[in-house]
Image (spheres, rainbow, N blue to C red):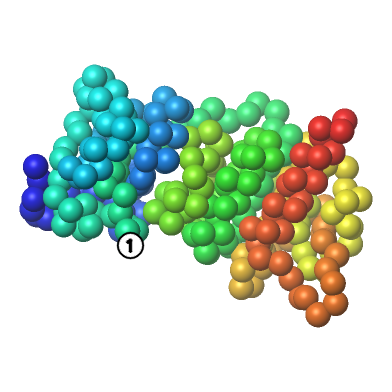
Amino acid sequence: MITSLKNDSVRLVQALQARRRVRQRERRFVIEGVRLCAEAERAGVLPHLVFFTPAAREDRRIAALLDGWRGRGVACREVSQEVMGGCSATETPQGLLAVVPIPALPRPAHPTLTLIPDRLRDPGNLGAILRTTLAAGGDRVLLPPGTVDATNPKVVRAGMGAHFHLPLVTAGWDEIPRLVSGCRVYLAASEGDVLYTAVDWTEPLVLIVGGEAAGAGERARALADALVTIPLAGGVESLNAAIAAAVMLFEAARQRRAG
């Protein structure tokens, strides 16, 4: 059992949890809890390293995951509750975490529904948007500068496994116009020109959702063909970015199913 917070593997996990540059250098990030670990297993992702506590090992689901990983040569290390607490990014650790490779999923050759969260800084919002994009049948998410890192622990937790199934592409604004060529681009706006229900969501398109504070940047606005809006009852100025994205993405899903 690992009982020291000075252990090299423990320090690696802590660094991955705390610093984006370490995650980018190592091309790894940390997932926590049985649900995320089971999702990684379902997606065929093999961890580099797994930590578990003795209490967690009593859970049949966790025991099955550990047995499967060990059978494939994964280093599964028992750790004390103190070590788990020192490595976890949650207030109440579930007693299981894994270091996994950052997925390099194939990009769609002909994307039909792309989401761009521009200058989105709230990790919970980004994670929810990733999960929603996957659930609504989106092809990919383009991550421009100024948006929170997709491997941030809070994003990963809120994404609930979307990272293992949805291509996430980090791209600058000099590259994004080429990546969305051939698609109609809509920018979500509180005072848009087009109602979201009037958009033809069955054609190849891109939806840009701006950040919580200042909204989308100038480059995003310049790229948009039109501003799309959700009508709101009087006295309500705007919706949370993740909620607005969900409303529009599921309208796209509805139209595509009907088509």
| The image quarter in which residue 231 lies | bottom right
Residue 75 position in % (x across, y down) = 19, 31
Does 165 sit left or right of 42 as displayed?
A: right
Residue 173 position in % (x across, y down) = 61, 52
Residue 103 position in % (x across, y down) = 44, 34
Q: Please, which residue is most extreme toward the bottom here?
A: 235
Does 159 sit left or right of 30 as displayed?
A: right
Quadrant containing the C terminus is top right
Does 95 sit left or right of 116 as displayed?
A: left
Q: Is residue 208 visible?
A: no
At x 80%, y 46%, the residue is 251
Crowding around mark 1 (Cα neighbors within 10 Å: few <14, some 14 to 19, many 20+) is few
Q: Secondary structure at mark 1?
A: loop
**Mark 1: amino acid:** Glu
Question: Residue 43 versus residue 175: which sits nearer the camera?
Answer: 43
How many circles with numbers are drawn on the protein? 1
At x 27%, y 31%, the residue is 63
- Residue with the mark numbered 1: 91
Quadrant containing the N terminus is top left
At x 74%, y 34%, the residue is 112
Does 8 sit left or right of 52 as displayed?
A: left
**Vertical arrangement, residue 86 with respect to residue 165, above or below:** below
